[in-house]
Image: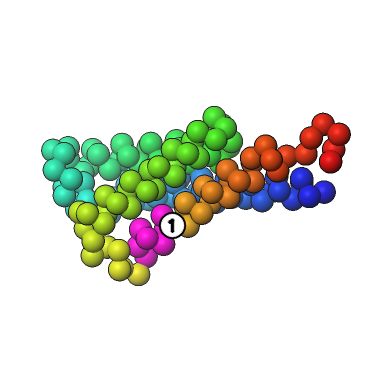
Amino acid sequence: MASNMLSQAAFLCRLGLGFLFIYHGLLPKILFLSPIEISLVEASGAGVPANIASPLAGVLEIVLGLLIALRLGGKPPVYLAAFALIILLIYVALLSPALLVEAFNPVTTNLLGLLLCYLILRLESPALQPDATGS
């Protein structure tokens, strides 16, 4: 019974984290290119136009979200998500720190995403899985 509850909790965490990446990849990067996304791409100085870089990043986020939500690839996509959330938060803090105090900001989004990563990895750890005897 407890194992089933842990599996359900891990599943819900995966759905939540997957949704986070799918939503942020699709809406502000592909369907409705956000002015904030444009300014972040331009601030990077990479020389790639935002109308190319943002949708490309959006596709990668959607793929990552699907891998996580559908449990494809096991734990590596979750580790990749955690790494990306940390790097992107640092990126925003360095290039556009004013965004960190906005109403819907990357601090809350990324920290909650990191919490979901931690919960998935913890809930799916072998230490929490029942052994072959069912105990």
Helix, strand or loop for the magenta stretch, by majority: helix
Q: Quadrant of the C terminus?
A: top right
Q: Say which amino acid is labelled 1.
A: Leu
| Residue 5 in picture, x, y percent from top left | 74, 50
Seen at 20% across and 54% down, the residue is 95
Q: Is residue 65 visible?
A: yes
- Asked if residue 20 is positioned above or below residue 58 in the image, the reply reads below
Give the camera-side residue of 47 and 76. 76
Q: Of helix, strand and loop, which one carries label 1? A: helix
Query: In the image, is 54 to the left or to the right of 42?
Result: right
Is residue 26 in view from this perspective? no
Q: Residue at point 44% right, 42% down? A: 81
In the rendered image, residue 129 lying in the magenta stretch gets the answer no
- Percent across and percent down for residue 83 are 40, 42
Query: What segment carries the magenta color?
Result: 104-111
Instruction: Check residue 105 for magenta coloring.
Output: yes
Which residue was labeled with disc 1? 111
Give the image location of residue 132, x and y in percent.
82, 31
Label 1 neighbour load within 10 Å: few <14, some 14-19, many 20+: some
Where residue 113 appears, as percent x and y from the top left, is 47, 52
The structure residue drawn at horizontal position 78% and vertical position 39%, both measured from the top left corner, is 130
